Amino acid sequence: MKRALWSASLVLAAGLSLPGFGARAQTPVAVTVRPAATPAVVVSKHIYGHFAEHLGRCIYDGFWADSALNVPKQGRLRLDVVRALQKIRVPNLRWPGGCFADAYHWRDGVGPTAQRPRGLNIWWGDVVEDNSFGTHEFLELCRLLGTEPYLAANVGSGTVQEMAGWMEYLNSSADTPLTRQRAQNGHPAPYGVTLWGIGNESWGCGGNMTAEYYTDVYKRYATFAHNYPGSPPLRRIVSGANGDDAHWTETCMKNIPLNMMWGLTLHQYTLPTGSWTGSKGPTTGFGEAEYFNTLRNCLKMEAVVTRHAAIMDKYDPEKKVALLVDEWGVWTDVEPGTNPGFLYQQNSLRDALVAGTTLNIFNNHADRVRGANLAQAVNVLQALILTEREKMLLTPTYHVFDLYQVHQDATLLPLDFTSPDYVLNGEKIPALNASASRDQRGAVHISLVNLDPQKTLQLTTSLPGVAWQTVTGRILTSASVADYNTFARPNTVQPTAFKGARKRGGQLAVALPPRSVVVLELR
Ligand code: AHR
């Protein structure tokens, strides 16, 4: 574990305080937890979705181990990885890409493994794809995880017929050559896969299309995305905008009839430097300026989601179409010495603060944001899990998904507060972000993120209309925002019990430590 130079020791030397140890008095932040809206807004569990692409070591070496590897396995599926993901309740898993999806031909990945053709992964390092992990293996992984599969159909280099055949293969119960093939391959019953992305980044690696052209293509594909008798109806998903590309969203909403789409996507990554050209910034060993910039860039998600949601509202005031941020997360330079095409990066407390902040934004926009997929689950970008041969570690980001799972399918409780600023070099961002929900048992959960690396925030929270007696909580923090878990020291950053909240009369008083994610439960 490395520490950035501005770690806890310097903080102490500067006379500043550490969490829970005589924190300097701050102006209290007044927070109000408002009653649920009418009708209630539900925080869709699908906001907590994940993404597994044939990219680097996500599938191969991540989920799908070498037969000789000495880890618990079912076939070649790594059960240590599966068990860790079961614990955080993954609601959906997106596959096979990403850019890879628009070069993927599903027929190459079914049938006896030895007969599957080998191909090249043109997007990610030109490595050989042996197709040993295909449709059945992915759906078995989903079954083990108890998660819904979210498939991305190949629009960029595929055909309508190829996509329609995949759907028939998976969902039809009629006696056809394709369903016989499915049965021969071990699955007589239809799978009933309903979440279907029609292309991926069609403005870029999915075909470099204009929005106008793509919407015509989308309608052609969506027409043949058939609902098979006995199988639940498909949720057809439009490949959406890159970041703040409002024209793409506007064109999709204008040109595609609402009844032809269940969802529209958006991809928005957080780059520490904010630039796709040159260095994106290191994942570890960064200084405070890089930390500040990363969080400032992450907070752009609020404006981006607000902008796309407003466009959608114009065409769909009843909010029938879901906005799905089906790729998000921190994207840094790769770890030194690793294949640049594999996008392998470490994951620090900074990533956890990005995750907590982003999930708070999604929760607070749950009226429109009804799905999201962190990029990606294992060994790629802002991963939940890193593996090295038989070793496995849980990243700080994993722990945020663990803490936040309480929000899945809970009722959103809107919050009012004015955040203090976190100021660096004359620039400022809001130090505090939060979201709250009430679960089906009546427990209220409040997730709080303090981005300020040095100051404790004193919160005084009123909850009109909420009857509660006890408060408990968990916290994720560390001595430095640059701290991370290694295979040698996998528990450097992990959640612990939080003791900084108490009931004061009818109010909830919280001393929210610097650089922390806290989730409280009120009963
Ligand atoms: O997540 C990595 C890549 O980022 C995906 O393949 C692509 O959709 C996006 O550009």
Image (spheres, rainbow, N blue to C red):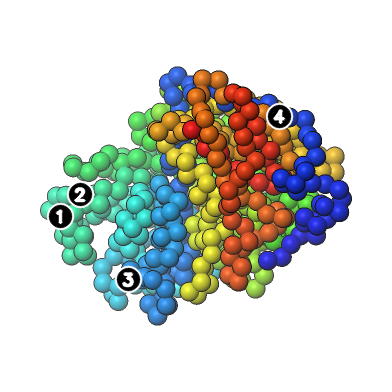
Within-10-Å neighbours for mark 1: few <14, some 14–19, many 20+: few
Q: State yes or no: discs 1 and 2 in contact (Cβ < 8 Å).
A: yes
Please name which of the two marks, 4 or 1, marks the residue nearer to the observer: 4
Residues under labels 2 and 4: Cα distance?
56 Å
Quadrant occupied by the N terminus: bottom right
Q: State yes or no: discs 3 and 1 in contact (Cβ < 8 Å).
A: no
| Residue kind at label 2, given as amino acid type | Ser
- For disc 3, the marked residue is 75
Does ligand 1 reach within 8 Å of label 1's beta carbon? no
Nearest the camera: 53 or 9?
9
Please name which of the two marks, 2 or 3, marks the residue nearer to the observer: 3
N-terminal of the pair, mark 2 or mark 4, is 4
- For disc 1, the marked residue is 176
| Residue kind at label 3, given as amino acid type | Gly
Please tell me whether mark 2 sits on a helix, a strand or a loop.
loop
Residues under labels 3 and 1: Cα distance?
29 Å
Q: Residue at x 38, y 36 (%)?
A: 262
Q: Residue at x 34, y 52 (%)?
A: 146
Residue 444 in the image: x percent, y percent?
A: 50, 32
Please tell me whether mark 1 sits on a helix, a strand or a loop.
loop
N-terminal of the pair, mark 3 or mark 4, is 4
- For disc 2, the marked residue is 172
- For disc 4, the marked residue is 29
Please tell me whether mark 4 sits on a helix, a strand or a loop.
strand
Please name which of the two marks, 3 or 1, marks the residue nearer to the observer: 3
Residues under labels 2 and 3: Cα distance?
27 Å
Q: Is residue 518 visible?
A: yes
Nearest the camera: 272 or 308?
272
Q: State yes or no: discs 2 and 3 in contact (Cβ < 8 Å).
A: no
Q: Is residue 253 visible?
A: no
Q: Name the residue furthest left.
A: 175
N-terminal of the pair, mark 2 or mark 3, is 3
